[in-house]
Image (spheres, rainbow, N blue to C red):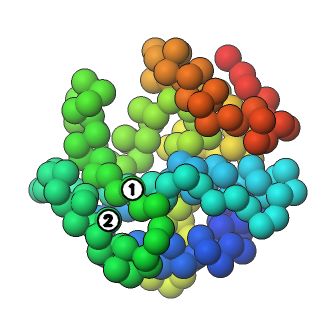
Amino acid sequence: MPVIADIIAQDPVGMEQLRAVRALGLPDWCIAAGFVRNRVWDHLHGIAPGRAPADIDVLFYDSADISKEREFELEDRLDDILPGQPWQVRNQARMHVWKNLPQHKSTADAMTYWLETVTAVGVRLEADDSITVIAPLGTDDLLNLRCRPTDFGCTRRNDYEARIAAKRWRELWPKVRFLE
């Protein structure tokens, strides 16, 4: 079975996007969510080329500056580097606020509070062009075409179900099994 880093490395568009984010020099960063999930599921469904995600979720962790303005500035910088992409930059050091949780400790910690396990997977392009996979909840569900709520998602079951329906995952990836 192909590993996530191999799937991403074979995608020239994804690699270009990773290089753009790497150029920012952000602390504790990765691109996650649909960027990874969609590419892996498309690959496992034999869909080539893979479909572009609706947005490119760039995560980083910097407790020194949790302003929303910094996120907008970083999106502008990314648009200068690689224009026309649906960049969405979020500092995970502030994401706990709207979820009414204690402050997250890192990008990986923040991802454990997402709704489903298959979305809590990110990738980072290292200086030597190797790809690091950040998956605090593992990669088994993603690679085995299983979707299930995280522990946090279990506490917000209606949000989890609504998200799956709104994203049309059952239609787009019919081989995925949705588990309780």
In the image, residue 47 sits, relative to residue 106, either above or below, namely below
Left of 66 or right of it: where is 113?
Answer: right
User: Are dots 1 and 2 in contact, CB under 8 Å?
Assistant: yes
**Secondary element at image label 1:** strand
Res 15 seen here = yes
Residue under the point 72% across and 22% down: 179
Query: Which quarter of the image is occupied by the N terminus?
Result: bottom right
Residue 85 pos. (x, y %)? 47, 68
Residue 32 pos. (x, y %)? 50, 53
Residue under the point 87% across and 57% down: 46
Query: Which quarter of the image is occupied by the C terminus?
Result: top right
The crowding category of the residue bearing disc 2, from other C-alpha atoms within 10 Å (few below 14, some 14 to 19, many at least 20), is many
Q: Quadrant of residue 60?
A: bottom left
The three-letter amino acid code for the residue at tag 2 is Glu
How much space separates mark 1 and mark 2, taking CA atoms? 7 Å
Residue 150 pos. (x, y %)? 53, 27
Q: Quadrant of residue 10?
A: bottom right
Residue under the point 39% across and 56% down: 88
